[in-house]
Structures are given as structure tokens and as C-alpha cells.
Amino acid sequence: MASKNIYPIGTLPPLGEVPQYMYAQVIRQDRLGEPRNAFQIEEMEVPEVAPDQVLVAVMAAGINYNNVWAARGVPIDVIAARQAAGDTRNFHIGGSDASGIVYAIGSDVSNVKIGDEVVIHHGWWDRNDPWVLAGKDPMIAPSAKIWGYETNYGSFGQFTIAQAHQCMPKAAHLTWEAAAASTLVGTTAYRMLFGWQGNTLQKNDVVLVWGGSGGLGSIAIQLVRSQGGLPIAVVSSDERGEYCKKLGAVGYINRKEFDHWGIPPHWTDTEGQKKWSKSARAFGKKIWDILGERRSPAIVFEHPGEDTIPTSIFICEQGGMVVICAGTTGYSAMVDLRYHWTRQKRLQGSHGTNDQQAYAYNQLVCDGIIDPCLTHVGRFEDIPQVHQNMGEGTHAAGNAAILVGVPERGLGKK
Ligand code: NAP
């Protein structure tokens, strides 16, 4: 089977010995579309490290929604985008979450060494970018990228390339697959909740978490609770709501009880507006019922986008923030400016993570304060189908991971 002396999946070469070839789940442009077809296992050359990079043998890879987008080529074809920037490669090896072992380091790397057990965060930038050199938030730099989505050689190969600053210690008490499951969603949620000065999470704040049982939501609930906030989940079933309560939500709203989703009627349509605000008000009242007092969310944790933004802006507390990191249901979100400006609310975009936020999140995981919510473990061959399920919304609550260099689940705990 291994025509190029490739180590089988579930095995590793001796520490520090880097083979020439590896297996990877590869997306190519002529396969863009349904994830189940877009990914295929191919034999690929193991890449070389640049001076500021490390090569990590992937033990387990976490699954995220971004490679559903990469497989579909929507909203962008990531291969074409890289080629437009001068990259000649015609493939995408995705995967923005990994646990693994450092196998090679670049000449400038001093924070990790061969043999270190690490997890990798998804913030990537050019260390010589003037914005980064000026000491500003590197995730806003023109060169900032999401590792394993906008960069090649993510974690869906036996070896991955990361910048050294992305590497963080693997939590000793976690298995390889649990350690791989939550860094992307967790660090993103951390930035959303703690990254935006003036509206950072405070003790006793009410936080509405859309998709509370999903990847981002399950970690956001725990983060809010761990800082003394009051998370309220929005879900599509009572079963998912109960899952959120176990994670620390003070209550949940089943969104299936409402139908005012999407772009609301135009403000000149008086009757339509009346009907819309009646339903949005009833949704907001659910929050007060859960709390037992008339308090609105200081932070609304958003990612569905088009379907939910009007409601999020409507129910957010005066001076509060709707913070959004995606538009899973669409990008044409409508904001009724009356509620936005008169009540001085903030609609804040948030993307990725910087080092300080990622390290703070990883410490909470290492300390056992945040559980990665691993609910599904698959095989390397399952990567296409797991993304297919995620794209169709039929995946399990919580987070999923795939075994790559590790032969079976349950290994890696110290
Ligand atoms: P996920 O695990 O699939 O969870 C998404 C949740 O959204 C689901 O659990 C679902 O819960 C809820 N949902 C689905 N349709 C909805 C609708 N019409 N209205 C309201 N809620 C709906 O995905 P995830 O990992 O949390 O990621 C969510 C989005 O964030 C993705 O688009 C992903 O690409 C993006 N993201 C961005 C960043 C970044 O750095 N910018 C980082 C991580 C993720 P219910 O059906 O129970 O309501």
C-alpha cells in the first residue's frame, strides 16, 4: 500500500525522523462542492519548515466548520485565493486544530523543541508585518490568516506546519483526541468574550449564546460561567438545551418556538413590523423568564448571522455588544438602526485569536476549568463524512476529533 514508504496512519516515525511523504486528506479545485467528495486521501510531500516554523506530527485533528467552507469553495476558493497571492500550489490540506509532537523546528525557533507535546492555535501572521512589528493586535494585521484554512498544510495530514508561536502545551490530563478538539472554537470564543475593550465580560453579565450546544457555543457557555457570568443558550431542541444546562447555562430558549428569522419586513411595512417585533419581544421575554428579572444580555454571542442578527440587536442591553464571528445562515444581516444608535449598542466583528488570548484559553483547559466537549471521535478516513454531517447540521453537539498518528482513542493522558 505505501508506494513511497509512507508510515501507515496510526503510526509515527522515530522522533525527529521526518519522512519524505505522508498521507493527507486533500481538497482540489475540480472536487469543490459536497465535503464527502471534496476531500480525498493522497500521498503528499512533507513540507519543509521556514525559520519561524515547526513541523508537528499530528496525533489527532479537530474538526471545524471552516473546512466545510473550504470544501464547498464558498464564500471563497481558498486555493484560488492563495494562488492570487503568488502561491503556486494547487491543493488544500485543511485542518485548524491539532494535538501532536514537534518533529522539526526552524532555525529561529526557541519556544519549543523536538519531542514537545503541543496543541496549535489558529492565528497565523507574518512576523515582519509592520502592524505586528508595531506591537498591535496581530490578528488584525494585513498578513493575518486562519491556519489550516487560509494556509496550507493544516492538521488533516500526518504532518502539519505551524508558526512556533502557535504552539502551546498540551493539557496533560487530556487524551490526544480531547486535546485536539477545542482550541479553535475555544480561543475564538475567548477573544469574542474578553477581547473587545469596553464590552468585555463582567461578573454577573447576562450572555445570550446562539448555538449553545455547538462547537463555539459549548465552550462559550463554560467561559461565561467560569467568570461568574450568566449564560443563556439558544438551541433547536430540548435535548440540546439540557446539554447546555449541564455545561453551566442558567437556561435555554428553543428557537423552534419562534418564526421571525431572517431579514425583517421593511420599516415602512407597519403591519409586518408589528408582527415581527411581537415575536422578537416574546423571544426577549424568555430571557427575563429564565432570569426571573427584567435584564437583557450585556453580550450576545453571534455566529448564525442573517437569520438572527436582527433579533440579537433588538434584545441586546443598552450599551451592550453583539459580537459575531461568522454568518453561517447568510451574510445579508439587517440591523434596525433605531435600536442600534438610540440604545448605543455595539456590533463587533471578531475573528481568530492572538497569542495572549490563545494562551489564556489553553491555561483554562490545562487547569481543567474548561472541558473540550469532545462528543465524536472518528478515523482519518472519516474526515469527508464528518464535514458533510457538519455542513448538513446532523453532527453531534459539542466538538469532534479524528485520530491521525495515534492508533486508538484514549491515549496521551499523563
Ligand atoms: P457548529 O458546531 O455546527 O454549531 C453551530 C450551531 O449553530 C449549531 O449547534 C446550531 O444549533 C446553530 N444553528 C444552526 N442553524 C441556526 C439558525 N438558523 N439559527 C440559529 N442557530 C443556528 O459550528 P461552530 O463550530 O460553533 O461554528 C459556528 C460558525 O462559526 C461556523 O460558520 C464557523 O465557520 C464559524 N467560526 C468562525 C471562527 C472565526 O474565527 N471567525 C471560529 C470558529 C467558528 P441549534 O440548531 O441547536 O440552534
Image (cartoon, grey):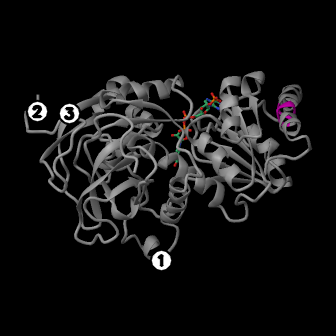
Q: Which image quarter: residue 198? A: bottom right
Residue denoted by label 2? 2
Q: Residue at x 75, y 59 (%)?
A: 202
When the figure is inspected, residue 13 is found, relative to residue 127, above or below; the finding is above
Question: Magenta stretch: dominant SS?
Answer: helix
Range of residues picked out in magenta? 280-284
Q: Is the C-beta separation of discs 2 and 1 under 8 Å? A: no
Q: Is 3 contained in the magenta span? A: no
Q: Earlier along the polypeptide chain: callout 3 or callout 2?
A: 2
**Magenta stretch: residue 281 in it?**
yes
> Horizontal and vertical percent for residue 225?
70, 49
Amino acid on which disc 1 is placed: Ala
Identify the residue under disc 3.
42
Residue 237 in view (yes/no): no
Q: Is mark 2 within 8 Å of ligand 1?
A: no
Q: Which mark is residue 248?
A: none
Quadrant position of the N terminus in the picture: top left
- Tell which tag, 2 or 1, sits nearer the viewer: 2
Q: Residue 249 location in percent, x, y? A: 72, 40
Q: CA distance from mark 3 to mark 2?
A: 11 Å
Q: Against 98, is 241 above or below?
A: above
Helix, strand or loop at label 2? It is loop
Q: For the residue carrying disc 2, how many other residues have a C-alpha within 10 Å: few (<14), some (14-19), or many (20+)? A: few
> Which residue is located at x 34 percent, y 63 percent?
164
Density class for disc 3 (Cα within 10 Å; few <14, some 14-19, many ≥20) is few
**Residue carrying label 1:** 134
Which is nearer the eye, 223 or 282?
Answer: 223
Q: Position of residue 205 (x, y in %)?
A: 78, 53
Residue at the front extreme, as displayed: 414
State the residue in front, 174 or 103.
174
Mark in front: 1 vs 3:
3
Residue 191 visible to an observer of this rendering: yes
